């Protein structure tokens, strides 16, 4: 890997990079099958990713014709790495075994270890024999929609493909490593004004928020729409706020601290609800939701939103908030959801839903076109990375723990081959035009 890094740092040509040997093993963050029972009897909140995420050498897989070897400069922590590392709701080895039965190439994925990570920025080292649009030396970001296009179901919206998977979560050889194997149709050009770590944090969360709010398959926000955004300084929430502002809408951000409120204000989001300060108790006990608290939240939203209910609710906490979210959407409004951080058995009062003709839209990651459009907006400097802090790969467990404990704002990057922060900027003038303040708003001082 040292030779690869040297070639990248010295600005070697694509032809030279194509000649650098690919090592037969590489450093990666992974969970092991031997550990899947390690947290039995432990409460979710107390399951510690530092115990289960190992960092060590793994064997380099063979390259399939539609894949590339990628030198990973940086990656990021997503919630799916938390799920994998605490083996919830299921150990991810079941996904790998199922994938492994699909074909000879797919069989490579069913291993005793699972290399995790669903984001990356880096440099293409080799391309498989069927790859057309990419070549060694290309500087790229990677989106995590892993689709086999032989299935007809993949050809309308590839998120509807019956064998659609999330790379690094439902497949092996993820991005939290010095090397990765990705399909050519996961590659996108690296935004030229960003460092490796800034470029690495966007694809998963940014594309998810784009589909939920902007793309044809989500809520299709219009100019003038108001949008309630839970977790508005979190990974997906922080991009959602930017999409609403860019699209001529009004974001109403929900967060849980004055520091997070200040970040939203600095982004231009004036309407903010601090759910902790307001002491909302949307459930009066484990089994019962409190409609009077939904009403109190609704009143607060209207106070901040010119007396109106919101057109769209950007939902992902799940069980804790879904009842309130369905209640809070306006008559004919839309709740768009992609997750259930606090629990997936959700409950809402169907009377508020049908009598007021609301809509509930399920959304999951993004297809290649949507991810590419979202990446382009980053490249144009219209949407900005939410990088808060950077960890070395050896401390990937610490970073996953911070996300698990809701201690992080925005996104946490992980340096893989990049030896330090701040490298990889190809267009410093563009960076100046986009503005350092926009790029560092989430950085911890
Ligand atoms: N389907 C997909 O493709 C997809 C893609 C990306 C993410 N996801 C999922 O979306 C969820 C959020 O991901 P993320 O990356 O944004 O995570 P994150 O960075 O940890 O942010 C989540 C935010 O949600 C808020 N939150 C957490 N628990 C809550 C609760 N019980 N009630 C109200 N707010 C709560 C927190 O904000 P405050 O404490 O400040 O309110 C937190 O900052 C995760 O479950 C993730 O797995 C799904």
Image (cartoon, rainbow, N blue to C red):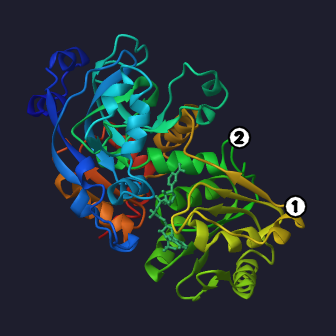
- Say whether residue 314 is left or right of residue 258: right
Q: Nearer the viewer, residue 56 or 265?
A: 56
For image coordinates 48% across by 51% down, the residue present is: 205
Residue 433 or 321: which is nearer the viewer? Answer: 321
Q: Is residue 422 visible?
A: no
Q: Is residue 41 above or below residue 183?
A: below
Q: Position of residue 92 (x, y in %)?
A: 39, 47
Crowdedness of circle 1 by 10 Å Cα count: few (<14), some, many (20+)?
few
Decide if residue 421 is on the left or right side of residue 23.
right
The circle drawn on residue 162 is: none
* Residue 130: % across, % down: 40, 11
Helix, strand or loop at disc 2?
Answer: loop
The C terminus, quarter of image = bottom left
- Residue at 83% x, 71% y is 352
Mark count: 2
Disc 2 crowd, CA 10 A, few/some/many (<14, 14-19, 20+): few
- The N terminus - image quarter: top left
Residue 195 rendering spot, x and y as whole percentages: 31, 45
Distance in Å between CA atoms under marks 2 and 1? 20 Å
Mark 2 or 1, nearer chain start: 2
Q: Residue beneath label 1, please? A: 357
The residue wearing badge 2 is 216
Q: Is residue 282 above or below residue 3?
A: below
Q: Is residue 261 visible?
A: yes
Q: Which residue does the image show at 45% across and 58% down from the upper left? A: 89
Residue drawn at x 44%, y 49% is 434
Q: Which SS class for mark 1?
A: loop
Image quarter for residue 188?
top left
| Relative height, residue 353 to residue 124 (above, below) | below
Residue 42: name its quadrant. bottom left
Determine whether, in the image, residue 405 is placed left or right of residue 250: left
């Amino acid at each position: 890997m040292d030779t690869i890094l040297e070639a990248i740092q010295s600005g070697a040509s694509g032809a030279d990079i194509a000649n650098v040997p690919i090592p037969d093993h590489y450093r990666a963050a992974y969970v092991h099958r031997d550990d899947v029972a390690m947290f039995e009897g432990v409460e979710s909140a107390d399951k510690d990713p530092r115990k289960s995420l190992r960092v060590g050498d793994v064997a380099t897989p063979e390259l399939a014709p539609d894949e590339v070897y990628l030198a990973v400069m940086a990656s990021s922590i997503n919630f799916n790495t938390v799920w994998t590392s605490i083996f919830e709701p299921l150990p991810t080895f079941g996904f790998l075994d199922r994938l492994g039965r699909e074909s000879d190439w797919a069989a490579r994925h069913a291993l005793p270890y699972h290399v995790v990570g669903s984001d990356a920025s880096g440099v293409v080292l080799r391309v498989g024999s069927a790859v057309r649009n990419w070549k060694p030396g290309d500087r790229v970001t990677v989106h995590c929609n892993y689709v086999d296009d032989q299935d007809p179901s993949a050809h309308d919206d590839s998120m509807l493909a019956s064998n659609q998977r999330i790379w690094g979560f439902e497949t092996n050889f993820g991005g939290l490593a010095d090397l990765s194997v990705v399909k050519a149709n996961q590659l996108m050009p690296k935004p030229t004004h960003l460092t490796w770590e800034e470029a690495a944090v966007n694809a998963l969360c940014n594309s998810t928020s784009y589909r939920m709010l902007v793309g044809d398959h989500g809520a299709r926000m219009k100019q003038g729409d108001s949008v309630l955004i839970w977790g508005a300084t979190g990974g997906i929430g922080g991009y959602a706020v930017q999409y609403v502002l860019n699209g001529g809408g009004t974001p109403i951000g929900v967060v849980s601290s004055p520091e997070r409120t200040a970040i939203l204000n600095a982004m231009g989001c004036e309407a903010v609800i601090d759910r902790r300060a307001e002491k909302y108790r949307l459930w009066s006990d484990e089994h019962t939701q409190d409609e009077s608290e939904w009403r109190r939240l609704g009143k607060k939203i209207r106070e901040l939103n010119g007396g109106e209910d919101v057109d769209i609710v950007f939902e992902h906490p799940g069980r804790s908030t879904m009842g309130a979210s369905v209640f809070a959407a306006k008559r004919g409004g839309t709740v768009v959801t992609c997750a259930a951080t606090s629990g997936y058995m959700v409950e809402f009062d169907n009377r508020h839903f049908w009598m007021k003709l609301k809509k509930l839209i399920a959304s999951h990651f993004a297809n290649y076109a949507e991810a590419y459009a979202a990446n382009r907006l980053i490249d144009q400097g219209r949407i900005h990375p939410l990088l808060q802090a950077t960890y070395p790969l050896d401390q990937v467990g610490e970073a996953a723990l911070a996300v698990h404990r809701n201690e992080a704002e925005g996104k946490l990057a992980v340096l893989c081959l990049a030896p330090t922060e701040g490298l990889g900027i190809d267009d410093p003038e563009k960076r100046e035009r986009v503005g350092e303040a926009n790029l560092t708003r989430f950085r911890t001082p």
